[in-house]
Amino acid sequence: MQHMIQSPDSPEARRYNQLKRWLSFADLAVGFIFLLILLVTGWSARLRDFALGPGEPRNYYVAIILYVFFLLVISKVLSFTLELYAFRLERRFHLSEQRFRSWLWDETKTFLLSFVLATIVVELIYATIRFAPQNWWLLAWTIFLALFVLMAQIAPVVLFPIFYKFAPLDNDELKSRLVKLGDRAGMPIRGVYEWKLSEKTKKANAALTGLGATRRIILADTLLQNYSTDEIEAVLAHELGHHVHRHILKSIAVQAAVTFAGFWLASEVLHYAVDSARWFESLSDFATLPLLVLVSTVMSALLMPVLNAYSRFNERQADRYCFQSVRSVEPFVTAMNKLAEQNLAERQPSKWVERLFHSHPSISNRVAAARAWTASAPKIAKSH
Ligand SMILES: [Zn+2]
């Protein structure tokens, strides 16, 4: 008999998630309008001339670095208010106690990191355009993919530590349970790390990251502090499910297909803009950059619901793996409810909100799946 009925979401949770959604719409709109203005007004060409400098033009690749820098500075100025609002929102809803200075330092690091990464990608694109004007997109896609795999590999050891501290998990009970989970799956666990998330947020999180030698499970300290060993084991079993089903590798394959189409489309649009419409003098004119970014922005916005549906499919698979590997789904259910509370998540968002924007099934659906699994599972194979 079950007397527990999902409590409806608090007005606070509804309000918070509504504001977060509006914030991401606004952010997308600002970026979109900025790119459009750059192209329509010819400011992109002026910015290019400025980057090339007066008189004898600067080296092409040096000018690209300057151009990317200007573009990023302007877009940072434009989006800063929204980012500041997002920071204050977390504090207003008591989800974070991060100080303003610490946040500003994170913003600075994010800016520098995106400047470095964007410069690499943009240089790469225009170098391939110059080298192979007709088939540049294929070449650029191949190199991009290699970079992407490299990034996935080095992220846990190089990128994440820029923002967060990590330490090997210091809990023997949990570690031994994890080894058992891994043994049963026939998948040795490479490493489990405590992720010091509490400096930035009160929300809890866990993830499977890295590739090959850097593959690891990271568990937020905000999770380790507030959840029972059984609950953490359920979370770990879910993350292990991602690994057993090779979700990182599959997601990279999906990304590869999406970017293949994206690079092809960008090349078609670029050829149209230069060869037919004559908006730009040559393919290698880097004033075309906002056009390429616009193609990728529109494409990712349109594909978001599809990619989210794929992600939810993976999450359900990882959940089912968890149900199979733990003694009882009860700790999973209580962990989910704690997570909803702690992260101020909507347990029951409207159907279309879940379909369009959520990378994870809603908490109410995940809990319902756990209950359904218990109800239908044979009562054997429960003796470990
Ligand atoms: Zn997951």
Image: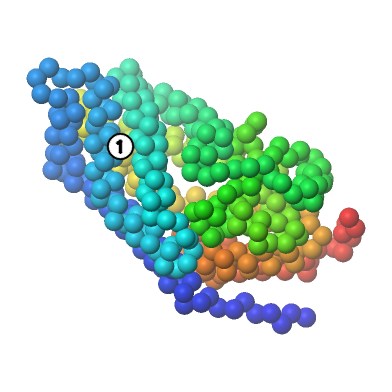
Rendered residue at 33%/21% (across/down):
127
Of residues 146 and 161, the one nearer the viewer is: 161
Residue 247 left/right relative to 75: right
- Look at mark 1 in the image and give the residue it sits on: 292
Q: Is residue 9 left or right of residue 246?
A: left
State left or right for residue 250 relative to residue 327.
Answer: left
Observer-nearest of 347 and 104: 104
Q: Position of residue 48 (x, y in %)?
A: 18, 30
Residue 255, x across and y down, in percent: 50, 39
Q: Residue at x 57, y 69 (%)?
A: 341
Q: Give the residue at the far left of this rendering.
A: 55
In this rendering, is residue 315 above or below 10? Answer: above
Q: Quadrant of residue 65?
A: top left
Q: Secondary structure at mark 1?
A: helix
Percent from the top left, x then y, of residue 367?
66, 67
Q: Is residue 324 above or below residue 167?
A: below
Q: Residue furthest bottom?
A: 3
User: Exactly how many numbered labels are in the figure?
Assistant: 1
Residue in the picture at 69% in, 79% down? 4
Q: For the C terminus, which image quadrant? A: bottom right
Q: Quadrant of residue 268?
A: top left
